Amino acid sequence: MPTQIEKARAFRVLHERSGTFVIPNPWDPGSARLLASLGFEALTSTSAGFAFSRGLPDYGVARDTILAHVADLAAATDVPMAADLENGFGDGPETVAETIRLAGATGIVGGSIEDATGRADAPIYSLEASVDRVRAAVEAARSLPFPFTLTARAENHLHGRNDLADTIRRLQAFQDAGADVLYAPGLKTRDEIATVLREIDRPLNVLMGFADGNLSVAELTELGVKRISVGATLARVAMGAFQRAAEELRTAGTFNFARDAASGAKLNGLFAPFA
């Protein structure tokens, strides 16, 4: 198993080399090991996918539980593991910094901090507060004994604030505050993504896996996107298949769903080295 610093350096290389890479989102050690077995070079957690697996809503899991979860993910495979650290689990910059320091002790090599408050009445922090929070996260990341890759997220488009100019202002401010990677989940079109890329000078993470309107990896590579994640989509796909199978069993009393089941023998073979 590579050391944390070796994984951290490998993760940095993925962002520094030419081209685009896909960083899918496991929600437990089994899904992490399956993704790693398929050749993905890095992984990152999904807070929503993990919450759903525990029967909780997104943002319904406490920080200590999230940190224990990402520690399990980081230990599950040889590939670099980053984490969705939500909004740092608190409003104040000091709490965000503490979250980064604690996350650095779990074995992960990077993480994201978003500018969403978690409050319906005021869903996005002010620009000034958001920058202070990112700056605190950057300082905490730089204090770690390995190169922690910090991603700063502008959440406007996930909260009905489709103001691209403001999103760009935020990303530029996060860049100036020292963020290593920039991320504005909810950008969908070529024009939106291309406009953002023209206005920033950091690697851009783009979220795909929408119900419709997805650009392909090849199209995003052509635009100049560095990193592509899918958030909770893989977890929701798994839950969707489970729900359809259970509904068939309950309503039709048939077992056609079993045709799509993963092979038990193959899963045993995949997981046997970890026993």
Image (tube, grey):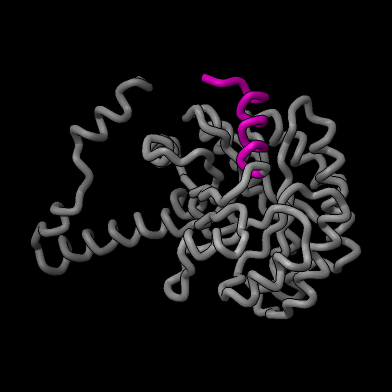
Which residue does the image show at 54% across and 63% down from the upper left?
Answer: 220
* Residue 119 among magenta residues: no
Looking at the image, residue 15 sits to the left or right of residue 221; the answer is right
Total marks shown come to 0
Residue 32 at x, y percent in the picture: 44, 39
Q: Nearer the viewer, residue 188 or 141?
A: 188
Q: Residue at x 32, y 28 (%)?
A: 271
Q: Please identify the dominant SS of the magenta region.
A: helix
> Is residue 13 in the magenta section?
yes
Left or right: 137, with 89 as reference point: right
Q: Is residue 119 above or below residue 102?
A: below
Q: Is residue 113 visible?
A: no
Q: Is residue 189 above or below residue 47?
A: below
Image position, residue 250 (x, y; %): 17, 63
Task: Please provide the residue range marked out in magenta.
Answer: 1-15
Residue 163 at least partly seen:
yes
Q: Quadrant of the C terminus?
A: top left
Q: Residue 189 location, x and y as percent?
A: 57, 75
Which residue is at the front of the view, 181 or 235?
181
The reply, left or right, for residue 269 in relation to residue 87 is left
